[in-house]
Image: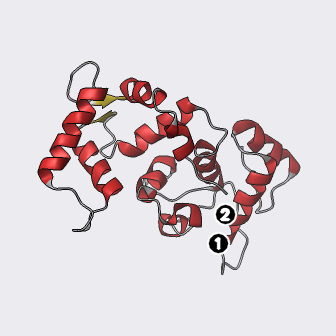
Amino acid sequence: MGTGASQLDKDSLLKYEELTFLTKQEILLAHKKFIQLFEGKKRPPELQTSRVPKHKIITVLELQYNPFRDRICHVFSTSEMNNGSLTFEDFLDLLSAFSDSATLEIKSHYAFRIFDFDDDGTLGCGDLEKLINLLTGETEDTSLKDDKVKQLINNILEESDIDKDGTVNLSEFQHVVSRSPDFVSSFKIVL
């Protein structure tokens, strides 16, 4: 799917446009941002193999203030070391999943994976607690008291856990998300 050099040729641009929810303009802008992350390198990066470390990816304005930035890098990274580093294609996949044009199914699939902190395929109490803490902030001023967090977890499970196994699986999550029209508009990154 990739190219050999740091330049984005027409064939690659067309392939990326077919394989993502991004427009040509968005792909070119993503390419520019990705190349900028290599600033100061002596040679231009090879798009097919060069990886940007997570600490640089999370400086991209679109991710900088996202409380899930570390999980986003983890989920979209194809690194065998699972270190959150991204190739250009990983970066495009991330931007594609968060684009306005991505389907509800794609957005909910990736949201579920991002919220599944222990990567066990379900959203259990531990995942939900981390989710709540990231959303409310973990400072003394913004964090919820333990009893409020437990009550919120119970409410989430009561509403979402259809099979009553104490966790939320992907299909249960997608069912809940399908009833929330604001989800699609809030799950996006704009270039």
Residue at the top extreme? 163
Do we see residue 1 in this rendering?
A: yes
Residue at the disc numbered 2 = 34
Q: Helix, strand, or loop for circle 1?
A: loop
- Tag 2: Cα neighbours inside 10 Å, few (<14), some, or many (≥20)? many
Residue at x-position 51% and y-position 51%:
77
Please identify the quadrant where the C terminus is shown. bottom right
Q: Position of residue 177 (x, y in %)?
A: 44, 31
Residue type pointed to by label 1: Phe
Q: Compare residues 163 and 144 and report the one nearer the observer.
A: 144
Image position of 57 (left or right of 132): right
- Tag 1: Cα neighbours inside 10 Å, few (<14), some, or many (≥20)? some
Q: Compare residues 167 and 152 and report the one nearer the observer.
A: 152
> Does 122 sit above or below residue 52?
above
Image position of 155 (left or right of 170): left
Residue at x-position 58% and y-position 42%:
97
Q: Position of residue 123 (x, y in %)?
A: 30, 36
Q: Are marks 2 and 1 in contact (CB under 8 Å)?
A: yes
Residue at the disc numbered 1 = 38
Q: Helix, strand, or loop for circle 2?
A: helix
Residue at the left extreme? 147
Do we see residue 3 in this rendering?
A: no
Q: Position of residue 10 (x, y in %)?
A: 87, 49
Residue at x-position 58% and y-position 46%:
98
Q: Closer to the observer: label 2 or label 1?
A: 2
Q: Quadrant of residue 118?
A: top left
State the CA–CA distance, disc 2 to disc 1. Answer: 7 Å
Image position of 96 (left or right of 110): right
Please identify the quadrant where the N terminus is shown. top right
* Number of numbered labels in the structure image: 2
